[in-house]
Amino acid sequence: MIKYFYKSLRTGSLQELADYRKGSWVYVEAPTEEEIEGLVHQFELDPGHIEDALDEDEMPRLEREGGLTYIFIRYAYTDDELQLTTAPLLFIVGRDVFITISLHPLPRLQRFLNGKIEFATTQQTKLVLLILDQIVDQYEVFINNIGRQIKMIRHRLKVHEIRNQDFVDFVQIEDELNEFLSAMNPTTAILRRMMLGKHLALFEEDQEIVEDLLLNNEQSIESCRSNVKTIVNIRESYSTIMSNNLNRSMQILTAVTVLITLPNVIFGMYGMNIDLPFQDQAWAYPLVIFVSVFIATSVYVIGRKRRIF
């Protein structure tokens, strides 16, 4: 799908055009092979970069080729299975060219189309920064939601018995955060390169926007790392607790086994079909019981003193 949007500083509202016009925003979403060939031919694009933009695993980077700047970014979104993931987005910026290529709808696209964000398609650099701002802000929203989810699970673990599903939830959240980190870390490097002004011409106002984007992106990265650390600490704590409980259970079972085995040794000897001491005495049975209880009690007391039991 290819759409053409146009808005200048003089026009009041965003226009969707039937064909390309100089200074318009070429919005490309999940393009077909024919559409890709048309774009490459019309704007003299690098076919390799276009193919990279349609690769789900493409990582953020910045390239300059043929008078055009190619900026690869990954943005966060919720897929059809309501799982958080990231996807690549390609900005192609030239003197009179501004193209975005993605496999899925651009984050918060409706804010641009509904006029909630003031922009002009003729200001390509400013538009790139505005879209990046929405992408970084979307990451922040998802990370904050994940942080609240972690707190809810942690609170539930304090008042309820731990379940296997809790660990499954933690693993899923950790995967999402790690995917965010793998996308945002290269974005920091891209923003630093943009601040140099070699790939995109930045005005003073644009420079301040890039600095704010860099700061917000780094804050989101630290939040991700903090949440991952929290998950790891919770998992390790419960792993230690479970290991300690298992050791305690094994100690109790061992103690019970010892206390049962010792009397059985004496009962076993007096149960043999041979002559035994005091076997004809009436008090032999109470003596056996007393000795068995005494030995078991002595072993228990010694075990408690030495913290074996």
Image (cartoon, rainbow, N blue to C red):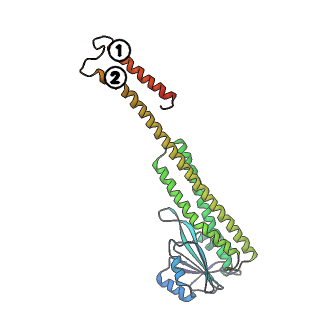
Residue 278 at what x, y percent from top left? Answer: 30, 13
Query: 48 and 270: which one is in front?
Result: 270
Circle 2 SS class: helix
Residue 94 has which mark?
A: none
Residue 266 has which mark?
A: 2
Task: Say whether residue 256 is left or right of residue 276.
Answer: right
Residue type at the position of mark 2: Ile
- The local crowd at label 2, few if under 14, some if 14 to 19, many if 20 or more residues have their Cα within 10 Å, is some
- Residue that protrudes farthest toward the left in the picture: 273
Image quadrant assignment for residue 265: top left
Q: Residue at x 71, y 69 (%)?
A: 211
Question: In the image, is residue 194 above or below residue 233?
Answer: below
- Residue that protrudes farthest toward the top in the picture: 282
- Residue that protrudes farthest toward the right in the picture: 204
Task: Say whether residue 304 is left or right of residue 73.
Answer: left
Residue 286 has which mark?
A: 1
CA separation in Å, label 2 and label 1: 12 Å
Residue type at the position of mark 1: Pro
Q: Residue at x 57, y 88 (%)?
A: 44
Question: In the image, is residue 119 above or below residue 137?
Answer: below
Q: Is residue 161 visible?
A: no
Give the mark toward the camera: 2 or 1: 2
Residue 70 at what x, y percent from top left? Answer: 60, 79
Residue 66 at what x, y percent from top left? Answer: 61, 87
Q: Is residue 249 visible?
A: yes
Question: In the image, is residue 73 above or below residue 38?
Answer: above
